[in-house]
Amino acid sequence: MLNDTIHPDKLPRHIAIIMDGNGRWAKTKGQPRVFGHKNGVTAVREVTEAAAEMGIEYLTLYAFSTENWSRPEIEVNALMSLLIETVRKEISTLNKNNIRLQAIGNLTGLPDKTRKALLEGIETTRNNSRMTLILALNYSSRWEIVEAAKKLAVAVKDGQLNVEDIDADAFAAQLNTCDFPDPELLIRTSGEYRISNYLLWQIAYTELYFTPVLWPDFRKKDLYDAIMDYQRRERRFGKTSEQLING
Ligand code: FPP
């Protein structure tokens, strides 16, 4: 059910989420951090379903950053296994709901089993068209930007590109996200006010929304709240309010 104070004509096309607070959630329950990640999957499922129902076209979830490798080995292994398990388990639901799975990040740096499960999920859902669910895995924005710069440098070196032709569009075309529009709304849970190396290029004009809710507690209503907040804002893209009203 769509909350009736959400305007369907003013929905963001793309929502990006930093799913934070799994460890703290587990701690409040006297459980190991991995328990928080497992329960985070429930929130992933809820939010994916709610976003698709509402007509959001793209949903990008920060599932594992390049910095997350420095966590205790037991947690990293558990997260990798959880990803395999979740992707395998959810493929049929994604297909039933016409949702396409995609991924951004350094996928070659993932353990073979995780990469294989992910690529299978991407392949099996590739013709789905209702919504694209993008997992950021072994992802960091600085890595992505450096890779894009290298690709442009190689193209210039090989004589396929003139330096004068490098502009924002040419640069964006080399990013992992080249097939997706920039997010209009970025949500971070758990009361932290940071971007943590996530989609730095893509969020140039994105509305930021921070909530104290810990990720495993995040439910459809929390997504509706974020969208309602977004819809109350005036997006000016550097213009004045008057220009927006008259233009
Ligand atoms: C941040 O919480 C969460 C993560 C680093 C992992 C997110 C993973 C999941 C929700 C599970 C699997 C996801 C998919 C898409 C299948 P934290 O551990 O940093 O929490 P803390 O800040 O309280 O320590």
Image (cartoon, grey):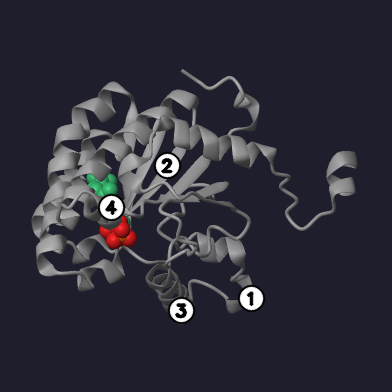
* Residue closest to the eye, 123 or 141: 141
Front tag of 4 and 1: 4
Is the distance from the Cβ of mark 4 to the nearest ligand 1 atom less than 8 Å?
A: yes
Q: Amino acid at mark 3?
A: Ala
Q: CA distance from mark 3 to mark 1?
A: 12 Å
Callout 2 secondary element: strand
Q: Which residue is mark 3?
A: 153
- Residue 32 is situated, as x and y percent measured from the top left of the image, at 14, 56
**Residue found at x 45% / y 82%:** 157
N-term mark: 3 or 1: 3
Counting other residues with Cα less than 10 Å from the Cα at mark 4, is it few (<14), some (14-19), or many (20 or more)? many
Q: Is any atom of residue 203 visible in this view?
A: yes
Callout 4 secondary element: helix
Q: Amino acid at mark 1?
A: Glu
Query: Which of the numbered marks, if any, corresponds to residue 164?
Result: 1
Q: Is residue 200 above or below residue 78?
A: below
Q: Amino acid at mark 4?
A: Asn
Q: CA distance from mark 2 to mark 3?
A: 31 Å
Q: Is residue 230 left or right of residue 52?
A: right
Query: Which of the numbered marks, if any, corresponds to residue 22?
Result: 4
Q: Amino acid at mark 2?
A: Leu
Counting other residues with Cα less than 10 Å from the Cα at mark 1, is it few (<14), some (14-19), or many (20 or more)? few
Q: Is residue 180 left or right of residue 168?
A: left
